[in-house]
Image: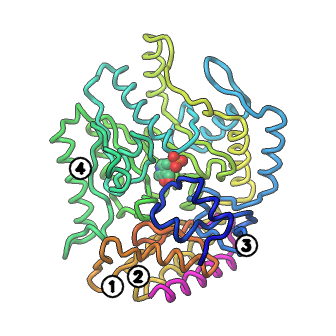
């Protein structure tokens, strides 16, 4: 099909993120125009169920009147100010207080960024600063995992454990290590039980720590449920064993809640669902339900005390972003948390989770589907060439992208992560809308066969 006028303008003007650039000139982008609830509409007026909340972020859906009013009010009161050098704004103070209230650990202070990548970059800098303050200048390596996704800035992309984020960008940088991905279906060995798989990969982490020397390792970073690596739910007991190992070697546990946070798994935080307690948290995305960009890092008192001591030596804590603590974003963060609380969004997610699970399990019988994975209202459907042997499609086959395109024809937006189809609908979705989403997905899988 020839490109429409707006599609032509797009390919002439934009460098698109995360896109097969060579193909876009032929297919053209899907240009979205407006949205309401769980639906978005393109420039031709076609309706789609947004099965991904945009990029795992618009948890309260589109066109929420309370959020729109909040934005208008804040823009007219004070559209911008910053937190540098002793300045402040009340929305940032209020949001930090609210985050401390709902934090799953004794959070002492909140540092604001504009994105999840900046939050994770900040985490690494803080881990380094902390160990310099503690007089341990050699304790600097950060352990991440294969298939992790922590962002795209130089350090956060290095933490990310996906080849496309490293290849030809000359990454990862030094001092970043990757340990096993906790995905039993893909990486469990023939005849190995899930418990044995867990013991093996935790054993590999232990061996890595011993080989590198625990005195050189500052932190381990993990998304409780891995999102952009393919919605991977680690086996039971995995995090308990990892946490014990980290504690034994005085290694910080950084929890990346950028996708998991704010109710996505049915609790405020993924670490509550997966049963571990971190030393610090990164969050973003559903923090404002994506109505404005914002990220945050929450740290413990022990970390904060060390930062104060270290900055005393130098005179200033030399880290911060122009838009960190932006009053518009923070006001939207405060309002989002208020809405999650007063509309009982977490309870709503928990009440829909059995239906989400049941519909995913039905899809698991489809001949194209190897495994379905889920927690709360986030799920993944892994497509395979051979269901019995788990044999994946040839690299470059593009089955996931093909399926996502059929989804669009059927009025459903999903995300292809390699051969896995990710689902992360707005948390306000109703039971009927969830059924409609799965009806469209089932048709999509049949069309893809
Ligand atoms: N961390 C996780 C777990 C993410 O899923 C993402 C983005 O998808 C990021 C960090 C990076 O966030 P941003 O794209 O806001 O920089």
Crowd rating for badge 1 (residues with CA inside 10 Å; few <14, some 14–19, many 20+): some
Query: In whole angstroms, how far apart are the C-alphas of marks 3 and 2?
Result: 32 Å
Residue depicted at x 30% and y 70%: 186
110 or 401, which lies in front? 401
Residue at x 64% of width, y 33% of height: 325
Residue 271 seen in the current view:
no
The residue range painted magenta reads 425-449
Q: Pick whichever of labels 1 and 2 is earlier in the sequence.
A: 2
The secondary element bearing badge 3 is classed as loop
First in sequence: mark 4 vs mark 2 = 4
Q: Nearer the viewer, mark 3 or mark 2?
A: 3
Residue wearing tag 4: 205
* Mark 3–mark 4 CB contact (< 8 Å): no
Q: Position of residue 391 (x, y in %)?
A: 28, 79
Q: Is residue 111 located in the magenta-colored stretch of the structure?
A: no
**Can you give x and y, in whole percent of width and height, for residue 183 in the image?**
33, 65
Check if residue 443 falls in the magenta segment. yes
The label number, if any, that marks residue 369 in the structure image: 2
- CA–CA distance in space, label 1 to label 2: 7 Å
The reply to whether discs 1 and 2 touch (Cβ–Cβ < 8 Å) is yes
Marking on residue 44 = 3
Label 3 lies in ligand 1 vicinity (Cβ under 8 Å): no
Assess whether mark 1 and mark 3 are in contact (beta carbons under 8 angstroms).
no
Q: What residue is shown at x 77% (from left), y 51% (from top)?
A: 67
- Mark 4, secondary structure of its residue: helix
Q: Quadrant of the N terminus?
A: bottom right
Residue at figure coordinates x 36%, y 75% from the top left: 397
Name the mark nearer the viewer: 3 or 1. 3
């Amino acid at each position: 099909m020839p490109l429409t006028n707006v599609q032509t303008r797009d390919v002439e003007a934009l460098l698109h993120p995360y896109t097969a650039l060579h193909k876009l000139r032929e297919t053209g982008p899907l240009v979205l125009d407006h949205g309401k609830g769980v639906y978005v509409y393109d420039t031709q007026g076609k309706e789609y169920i947004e099965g991904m909340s945009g990029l795992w972020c618009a948890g309260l859906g589109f066109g929420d009147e309370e959020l729109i009013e909040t934005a208008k009010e804040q823009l007219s009161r004070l559209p911008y100010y910053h937190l540098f050098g002793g300045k402040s704004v009340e929305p940032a103070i209020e949001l930090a207080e609210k985050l401390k209230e709902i934090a799953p650990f004794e959070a002492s202070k909140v540092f604001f960024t504009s994105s999840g990548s900046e939050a994770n970059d900040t985490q690494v800098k803080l881990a380094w600063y902390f160990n310099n303050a503690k007089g341990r200048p050699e304790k600097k390596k950060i352990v991440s995992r294969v298939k992790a996704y922590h962002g795209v800035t130089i350090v956060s992309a290095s933490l990310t454990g996906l080849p496309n984020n490293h290849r030809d960008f000359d990454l990862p940088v030094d001092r970043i290590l990757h340990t096993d991905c906790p995905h039993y279906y893909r990486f469990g060995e023939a005849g190995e039980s899930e418990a044995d798989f867990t013991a093996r990969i935790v054993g590999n982490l232990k061996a890595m720590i011993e080989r590198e020397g625990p005195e050189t390792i500052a932190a381990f970073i993990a998304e409780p449920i891995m999102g952009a690596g393919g919605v991977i739910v680690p086996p039971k007991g995995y995090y308990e064993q990892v946490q014990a190992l980290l504690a034994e070697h005085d290694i910080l546990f950084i929890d990346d809640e950028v996708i998991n946070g704010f109710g996505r798994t049915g609790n405020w935080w993924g670490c509550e669902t997966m049963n571990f307690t971190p030393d610090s948290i990164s969050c973003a995305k559903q923090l404002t339900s994506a109505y404005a960009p914002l990220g945050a890092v929450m740290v413990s008192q022990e970390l904060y005390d060390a930062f104060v001591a270290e900055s005393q030596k130098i005179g200033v804590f030399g880290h911060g972003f122009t838009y960190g603590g932006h009053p518009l974003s923070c006001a939207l963060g405060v309002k989002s948390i208020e809405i999650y609380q007063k509309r009982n969004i977490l309870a709503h997610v928990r009440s829909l989770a059995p239906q989400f699970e049941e519909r995913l399990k039905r899809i698991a019988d489809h001949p194209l589907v190897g495994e379905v994975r889920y927690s709360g209202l986030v799920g993944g459907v892994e497509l395979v060439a051979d269901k019995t042997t788990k044999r994946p499609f040839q690299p470059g086959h593009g089955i996931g992208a093909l399926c996502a395109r059929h989804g669009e024809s059927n009025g459903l937006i999903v995300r292809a992560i390699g051969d896995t189809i990710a689902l992360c609908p707005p948390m306000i979705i109703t039971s009927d809308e969830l059924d409609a989403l799965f009806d469209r997905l089932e048709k999509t899988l049949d069309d893809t066969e």
